């Protein structure tokens, strides 16, 4: 039986409603790009957040430098969590629209070794030169000091301690701090410089010592909203998640993973 005009209208408007509803649902996806060292903590935080919201949070982890370049090249991004100020500043210089930028978390840079290492303690700056702990042909794992935040902090520390020149040719440079940690976990290198939270997340390494705070810039994680063009504001879903990540529930998660709040009164 042929459809009446009223039936055609109902079908047409119903189809439009379906398309609009799909668009709304698509708009509820939030892309969260975070430094690799935040993987475990952010995964747990996002799982907790999903318990009270229908927002689809897509988490992407890599070196802060890699993520910044992806964002600058147009990759989907609503929230960026960087392990240092350098790459957040770089995005700003590249003309990426940032908002709600804040220091979020702090961390420490530590020296780790495979769990079965005969070395139980080695405090950088106090227990002798690190290179003396490396046998001929052995290397120390680090995030690439040319661009990876953990590597940049490590280079600063080694320069401050007067060890950079000797150790620079003996570094195993990794694409991110988790890749550096993996080299130590597999026993491919006897030492690695990683964040304390990375060492705590692994049952295959042990912390030998902490790099002195005076030897490098404080390890600070920043958060910011990313707008899709200067004229557009971040979505309400992205803003809500950004606010939640700076709140008490998320802070508890981060602290369980070894991070400390950069400013507990103004996250």
Image: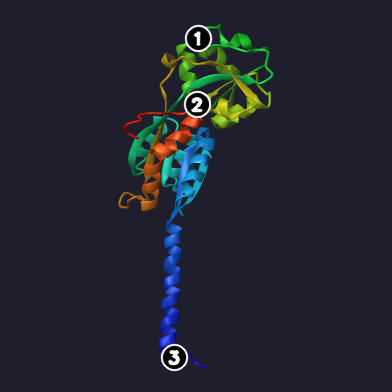
Would you name the residue on which mark 1 appears? 125
In the rendered image, is residue 145 in sight?
no
Q: Is residue 237 above or below residue 220?
A: below
Would you name the residue on which mark 2 appears? 150
Dot 3 falls on a residue whose secondary structure is loop
In this rendering, position of residue 182 left or right of residue 89? right
Of labels 3 and 1, earlier in sequence is 3
Distance (Cα) linking label 1 and label 2: 18 Å
In the displayed orientation, state which residue is furthest to the left: 231
In this rendering, position of residue 87 left or right of residue 38? left
Dot 1 falls on a residue whose secondary structure is loop
Of tags 3 and 1, the one toward the viewer is 3
The reply to whether dot 3 and dot 1 touch (C-beta < 8 Å) is: no
Would you name the residue on which mark 3 appears? 4
Q: Residues within 10 Å of mark 1 (few under 14, many from 20)?
A: some
The residue sitting at 55% across, 7% down in the picture is 127
| Place of residue 58 in the rendered image (x, y in percent of width and height, measured from the top left) | 50, 48
Quarter of the figure with residue 138: top right
In the displayed orientation, state which residue is furthest to the bottom: 1
The residue sitting at 32% across, 52% down in the picture is 232
Of labels 3 and 2, earlier in sequence is 3
The residue sitting at 44% across, 91% down in the picture is 4
Distance (Cα) linking label 3 and label 1: 85 Å
Distance (Cα) linking label 3 and label 2: 68 Å
The residue sitting at 43% across, 55% down in the picture is 28
């Amino acid at each position: 039986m042929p459809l009446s005009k009223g039936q055609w209208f109902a079908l047409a408007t119903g189809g439009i409603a379906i398309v609009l509803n799909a668009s709304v649902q698509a708009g509820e996806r939030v892309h969260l790009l975070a430094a690799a060292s935040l993987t475990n903590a952010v995964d747990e935080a996002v799982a907790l957040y999903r318990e009270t919201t229908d927002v689809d949070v897509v988490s992407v982890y890599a070196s802060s430098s890699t993520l910044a370049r992806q964002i600058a090249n147009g990759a989907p991004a609503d929230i960026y969590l960087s392990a240092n100020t350098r790459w957040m500043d770089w995005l700003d210089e590249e003309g990426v629209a940032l908002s709600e930028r804040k220091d979020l978390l702090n961390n420490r840079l530590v020296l780790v070794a495979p769990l079965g290492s005969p070395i139980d303690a080695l405090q950088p700056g106090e227990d002798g030169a690190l290179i003396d702990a490396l046998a001929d042909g052995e290397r120390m794992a680090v995030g690439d000091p040319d661009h990876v935040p953990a590597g940049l902090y490590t280079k600063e520390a080694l320069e401050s301690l007067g060890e950079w020149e000797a150790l620079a040719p003996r570094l195993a440079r990794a694409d991110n701090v988790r890749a550096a940690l993996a080299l130590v976990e597999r026993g491919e290198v006897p030492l690695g410089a990683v964040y304390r939270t990375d060492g705590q997340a692994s049952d295959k390494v042990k912390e030998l010592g902490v790099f002195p705070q005076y030897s490098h810039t404080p390890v600070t994680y920043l958060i910011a909203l990313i707008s899709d063009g200067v004229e557009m504001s971040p979505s309400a879903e992205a803003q809500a998640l950004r606010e939640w990540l700076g709140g008490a529930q998320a802070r508890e998660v981060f602290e369980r993973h070894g991070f400390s709040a950069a400013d507990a009164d103004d996250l």
